Amino acid sequence: MSQVEKLTPLHDITWYVKWLGTVFLILAVSSRSIGPPIDHIYDQCFSLVGLICWFYVAFKWHDRALMTVNAICLPLLLAGIVRSLLT
């Protein structure tokens, strides 16, 4: 049986930020799926924190695919949060 070698850093700052971002994205999806009485703004705010965490990790890892998806999603999500707060 062959052993798979881990390529991502372990227990450096990106490891902790990665998992914090993952927890926030899970909270976002959970609040989205629960629906009322959970307000829509919670989903958006949890998503925002998760995306910011993952963008930081992508930047530190020089991962262009992760940077691209987060760079595109962040302004879209911010626009949604602003719209939710103004309506």
Image (cartoon, grey):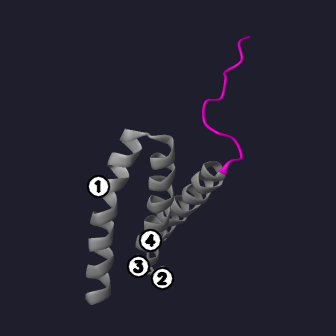
Report how far apart the C-alphas of labels 3 and 4 lie in the structure: 5 Å
In terms of sequence position, does the residue under pointer 2 or pointer 4 come before the other?
2
Q: Is mark 2 on a helix, strand or loop?
A: loop
Q: Nearer the N terminus, badge 1 or badge 3?
A: 3
Q: Give the image quarter of residue 74.
A: bottom left
Which image quarter holds the C terminus?
A: bottom left
As shown in the figure, which amino acid type bears the numbered disc 2? Pro
Q: In this view, does 24 lie above or below 9?
A: below
Q: Main secondary structure of the magenta part?
A: loop
| Secondary structure of residue under mark 3 | helix
Bin the neighbour count of mark 3 within 10 Å (Cα to Cα): few under 14, some 14-19, many 20 and up: some
Q: Name the residue under label 4.
A: 43
Residue 72 x/y as whole percent: 29, 55
Please state which of the two labelled residues, at mark 1 or mark 2, is closer to the viewer. 1
Q: In this view, does 69 lie to the left or right of 4?
A: left
Marks 2,4: beta carbons within 8 A: no
**Labels in figure, total:** 4
Is 48 above or below relative to 38?
above
The segment highlighted magenta reads: 1-12
Q: Distance between the residues labelled 1 and 2?
A: 29 Å
Residue 13: percent from the left, percent from the top?
A: 64, 53
Mark 1 vs mark 3, CA separation in Å: 19 Å
- Residue at 65 percent across and 29 percent down: it is 6
Residue under label 3, please give it.
Answer: 41
- Give residue 37's mark: 2
Q: Are marks 3 and 4 in contact (CB under 8 Å)?
A: yes
Mark 4 and mark 1 lie on one chain; the one further toward the N terminus is: 4
- Please name the residue that numbered disc 1 is placed on: 72
Q: Is residue 68 visible?
A: yes
SS for dot 1: helix
- Residue 2's mark? none
